[in-house]
Amino acid sequence: MDRFPGATSSGHIEPCLIDIPKHIDARGNLSVIDSTTCLPFPIKRVFYVYDIPTAAQRGGHAHYKLHQFLWCVSGAVEVSTISANGEANAFTLSLPWQGLYIPPLVWAHETALTAGCTYFVAASDYYDETDYIRDLTTFTQLS
């Protein structure tokens, strides 16, 4: 697989949807996420967000170095992104076999589209408060 999906000709990396390999079986489907099958980074941390009220927003920050992959296993969530070059996009995640790769220096926030949705985030590193950019003005001045 392309090591950094979403790479532009200038070398900048944009958020992009990635299909998670799925193994279809009459007893239930199985999907596996790791850096050899679909992710362009090794996973060091996984967390999940659940019982989210409809229209509630989470996130609202960017990271200097952290790579993330977000996928929704139940319900639907919209992920709004702003890249360092100012490009804004919105991605709807509602398929458990598809997720969104969020590279460093991308502002993102998530909005629950269905009550009680659950989404997971795989991260390239452990929690580090100094890697967060929590102010949108500061973020827009980085480009």
Image: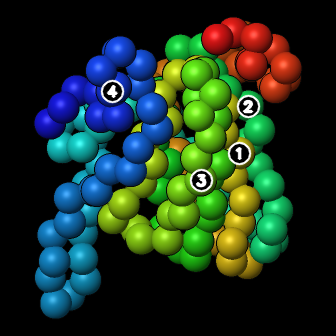
From the viewer's perspective, tell me whether residue 44 is left or right of residue 75. left
- Residue annotated with mark 4: 7
The kind of residue on which mark 2 rests is His
Percent x, y of residue 59: 73, 42
Q: Tell me the CA gap for discs 4 and 3.
A: 18 Å
Q: Tell me the CA gap for discs 3 and 2.
A: 15 Å
Q: Tell me the CA gap for discs 1 and 2.
A: 7 Å
Residue 120 seen in the figure: yes
In the foreground, 57 or 82: 82
Q: Secondary structure at mark 1?
A: strand
- The quadrant holding residue 62 is top right
Q: Tell me the CA gap for discs 4 and 1.
A: 21 Å
The kind of residue on which mark 1 rests is His
Percent x, y of residue 32: 25, 55
**Between tags 1 and 3, which lies in front?**
3
CB atoms of marks 1 and 2 within 8 Å:
yes
